[in-house]
Image (cartoon, rainbow, N blue to C red):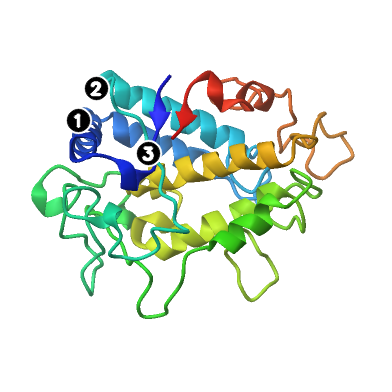
Amino acid sequence: MPVRKNQRDLTPVEKRRLVDALLELKKSGRYDDFVDLHGEFYVTDGERRPRAAHMTPSFFPWHRRYLLEFERALQEVDERVTVPYWDWTVDSSPTSSLWADDFLGGTGRSGDRQVMTGPFAHRNGGWRINSGALDGRFLTRDLGRPADPLTLPTRDDVARALSQSQYDEQPWDSTARGGFRNAMEGWAAGTPERWRMHNRVHRWVGGLMLGASSPNDPVFWLHHAYVDLLWARWQQAQPRAGYLPRTPLPSGEPQHGRVYALTEALPPWGDAPVALLDHTRWYRYG
């Protein structure tokens, strides 16, 4: 059974294998296919079309399958590689181990925010951004947003999210006032703090992590592995709760045909959320 480890527990050899697999996937063009897929399914709740990946109950199962497909692609390069997770409640500084030169590299330089260190720096030749003209051609970050400082979510923040007794609630979008899904995804419409939890981490990293093409930054996968782990912990903490909505929304509902119920197939793979509730079929967390 593959084990996804905390990134701080990776050995130097394990880090090197992961970096090499990422670079090889990028070289082959398959990495950019995953970036494009995320952009395709980044549908906001203001758009009048189906919403599988964000601002929706299927946020967790969609990203679980997405991450699993990416991990399988890495394992086609090196079968010993798994996607580690980044516990941002602990490793919450721009000097934390994942930003080291031998792993993900550090923050961007002043001015254009270009990452100049580590294996994913454009100047090192192996990481060219190809997802759109607005993204530029090099990886960018602004860790902690020094010009307008931002902190990462804390253990107390995670505990509050895990205490939610219901998975999701109407209106099943970014404006939901309760439920674990939106507490973790982190939309806070109408409040001074517009982004929380998962969203706040994207803001803290900055650069390319801010948009729909956020998988351009390899830290995306470590971030979402931790989000996936927290979903598993919520399931353990709330054993009587389950995925909602359980049945397709009726035609009179504003979200009819736009969000996915428990047994409705998620694009593009065709798995329903019910098939993605138990991660231990494929991997476990160490």
Q: Amino acid under label 3?
A: Pro
Residue picked out by circle 3:
84
Q: Are marks 1 and 2 in contact (CB under 8 Å)?
A: yes
Q: Is 277 above or below relative to 161?
A: above
Quadrant where the N terminus lies?
A: top left
Q: Residue furthest left?
A: 124
Camera-near label (2 vs 3) is 3
Q: Amino acid under label 1?
A: Glu
Q: Secondary structure at mark 3?
A: loop
Q: Residue furthest bottom?
A: 147
Tag 3 or tag 1, which sits nearer the N-term?
Answer: 1
Q: Name the quadrant containing residue 93.
A: bottom left
User: What number is the disc on residue 77?
Assistant: 2
Crowd tier of the residue under label 3, counting other residues whose Cα lies within 10 Å: few below 14, some 14–19, many 20 or above: many
Q: Amino acid under label 2?
A: Val
Q: Is 61 above or below relative to 152?
A: above
Is residue 218 visible from the viewing direction of this image? no
Tag 2 or tag 1, which sits nearer the N-term?
Answer: 1
Q: Is 210 above or below relative to 81?
A: below
